[in-house]
Image (cartoon, grey):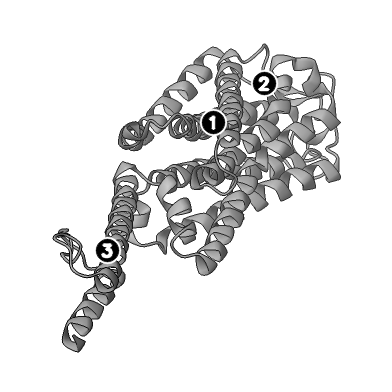
C-alpha cells in the first residue's frame, strides 16, 4: 500500500512518530488565499512592466519593483506549497514533516531575504530623494543585482546556522532564535521607519500642492506597508513562544504573505491617481510622478524644462516692458531709447511676436 493509504503503519499515530496536530481549515485557507492574492498582484505588475516603453523600464523605481515582484513570486510559491502541505496534516507523518520543514524553509528564507533587502533598498532611495541626493540615484540602480547576491548569501549562512524542525505545536519552527532573520527584518524595519519619519517631515515643509510633497507621501506608503506586514513576524521570530499560538502565528504569516499584494495595490492606485491628474493638468502632474521615481537623467530633463519656462517668462516680461515704453513714445513723442526694442536672443514667444507685429502695423499707419 502507498504510505498515504488507510491502515498503513506510517499513517498511524504512535508515541515514537506523533502525527501533526490537525490544521485549522480556516487558517490554511487564509494562508493560501494571501499567497494567491500576492501572486496575482506580482504577476499583474510584471505584465504591466513589460507593456511600458523601454525608457520607462529603465527608471529606478520600476526596476526596484520588478526585482521585488520576482522575489515575492518565489516567496509566495513557497507559501502556496506550505499551505497545501499544511492541509494534508492527517496524511503525512512527523518524519515526512521533518524532512519537509528544513529544505522548504531554506528556500523560503532565501527569497524572503531578497525581498526584505529590496524593501530596504526602496526605503534607502526614498531617504536619498528626501535629502535631495539625486546624484546617488544612478548608483542605486547598479546595486539592485547585488541585492540578489547578498540575499542568496544570507540564505546560505542562515541554512548553516539554523535548521528548522517539526514541532507539533508550531509546525515548522526553528530550535532557537533565528538571529539572521531577526537582524535582516529588524534592520529593514528601522530603515523603513526612519524613511517614513524623514519623508513626512520633509513633506510638511513643502508647499501643499508641490511636486516634492506628493512624491514623498507616495513613497512613504511602501515603508508603511513593510512595517504593517512584517512587524508581527519580527516579534514572533524574537519570541518563539508566540509561534506556538496558532492565532498569532497564522496572523503573522498572513500579514507577511499579503506584503506583495499591498505593494502592488499601492502602485496601481498611485499610477491611476497620477494618470487621472495628468489628464487634467498635463504640465504639472506627469512630471511630478514620473520624474521623481526616475533616475537622475529624467530629473535633469525636467529641470531643463523648468529653465526653459523661466527663460520664456523673462522674455515675455522684457517684451511687456518694451510695450510700455512704446506707448510712451506714441503719446509723448520720440526719445533716444524708448522706441528701440531691446535685443534678446531666442525671443520666439507668442507675446513677443504679437508685439513685433503691432510695431510694424503702427509704423505703417504712421
Tell me how far mark 3 sits from mark 1, CA to CA. Answer: 66 Å
Disc 3 from disc 2: Cα separation: 89 Å
Q: Is residue 274 visible?
A: yes
Residue tagged 3 = 325
**CB within 8 Å, label 2 to label 1:** no
Compared to residue 304, the image places residue 319 above or below, namely below
Q: Nearer the viewer, residue 147 or 322?
A: 322
Q: Earlier in the sequence, mark 3 or mark 1?
A: 1
**Residue at left 24%, top 69%?**
329
On residue 232, which mark appears? Answer: none
Mark sitting on residue 116 = 1
The image quarter in which residue 49 lies: bottom left
**Residue 205 position within the rendered picture, expressed as x and y whole percent measured from the top left:** 57, 34
Quarter placement of the N terminus: top right
Sort mark 1 into few (<14), some (14-19) or many (20+) by Cα contacts within 10 Å: many
Q: Mark 2 highlights which residue?
A: 165
Residue 13 in sight here: no
| Number of the front mark, 3 or 1 | 3
- Residue 266 spot, x, y in % from top left: 61, 49
Q: Residue at x 20, y 62 (%)?
A: 338
Count of numbered marks: 3
Secondary structure at numbered mark 2: strand
Q: Residues within 10 Å of mark 3 (few under 14, many from 20)?
A: some
Please state if 363 lies on the left or on the right of 282 as rendered.
Answer: left
> Alpha-carbon neighbours of circle 2 within 10 Å: few (<14), some, or many (≥20)?
some
Q: Please identify the quarter of the rendering in which residue 270 is found.
A: bottom right
In the figure, is residue 105 to the left or right of 303?
Answer: right
Q: Closer to us: mark 3 or mark 2?
A: 3
Amino acid at each position: 500500500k502507498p504510505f498515504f493509504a488507510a491502515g498503513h503503519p506510517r499513517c498511524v499515530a504512535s508515541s515514537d512518530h506523533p502525527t501533526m496536530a490537525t490544521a485549522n481549515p480556516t487558517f490554511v485557507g487564509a494562508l493560501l488565499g494571501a499567497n494567491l492574492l500576492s501572486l496575482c498582484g506580482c504577476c499583474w505588475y510584471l505584465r504591466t512592466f513589460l507593456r511600458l516603453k523601454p525608457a520607462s523600464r529603465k527608471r529606478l523605481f520600476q526596476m526596484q519593483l520588478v526585482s521585488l515582484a520576482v522575489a515575492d513570486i518565489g516567496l509566495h510559491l513557497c507559501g502556496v506549497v506550505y499551505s497545501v502541505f499544511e492541509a494534508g496534516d492527517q496524511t503525512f507523518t512527523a518524519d515526512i514533516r521533518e524532512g519537509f520543514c528544513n529544505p522548504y524553509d531554506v528556500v523560503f528564507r532565501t527569497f524572503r531575504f531578497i525581498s526584505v533587502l529590496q524593501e530596504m533598498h526602496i526605503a534607502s532611495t526614498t531617504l536619498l530623494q528626501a535629502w535631495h541626493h539625486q546624484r546617488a540615484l544612478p548608483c542605486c540602480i547598479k546595486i539592485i543585482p547585488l541585492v540578489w547576491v547578498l540575499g542568496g548569501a544570507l540564505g546560505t549562512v542562515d541554512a548553516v546556522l539554523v535548521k528548522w524542525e517539526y514541532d507539533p505545536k508550531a509546525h515548522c519552527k526553528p530550535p532557537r532564535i533565528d538571529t539572521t532573520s531577526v537582524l535582516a527584518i529588524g534592520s529593514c524595519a528601522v530603515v523603513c521607519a526612519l524613511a517614513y519619519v524623514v519623508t513626512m517631515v520633509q513633506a510638511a515643509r513643502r508647499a501643499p500642492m508641490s511636486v516634492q510633497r506628493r512624491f514623498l507621501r507616495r513613497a512613504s506608503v511602501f515603508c508603511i506597508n513593510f512595517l504593517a506586514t512584517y512587524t508581527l513576524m519580527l516579534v514572533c521570530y524574537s519570541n518563539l513562544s508566540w509561534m506556538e499560538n496558532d492565532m498569532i502565528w497564522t496572523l503573522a504569516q498572513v500579514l507577511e504573505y499579503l506584503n506583495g499584494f499591498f505593494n502592488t495595490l499601492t502602485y496601481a492606485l498611485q499610477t491611476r491617481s497620477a494618470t487621472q491628474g495628468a489628464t487634467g493638468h498635463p504640465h504639472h502632474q506627469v512630471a511630478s510622478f514620473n520624474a521623481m521615481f526616475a533616475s537622475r537623467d529624467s530629473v535633469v530633463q525636467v529641470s531643463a524644462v523648468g529653465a526653459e519656462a523661466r527663460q520664456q517668462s523673462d522674455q515675455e516680461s522684457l517684451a511687456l516692458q518694451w510695450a510700455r515704453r512704446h506707448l510712451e513714445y506714441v503719446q509723448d513723442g520720440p526719445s533716444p531709447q524708448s522706441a528701440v526694442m531691446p535685443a534678446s536672443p531666442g525671443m520666439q514667444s507668442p507675446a513677443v511676436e504679437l508685439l513685433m507685429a503691432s510695431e510694424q502695423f503702427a509704423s505703417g499707419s504712421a
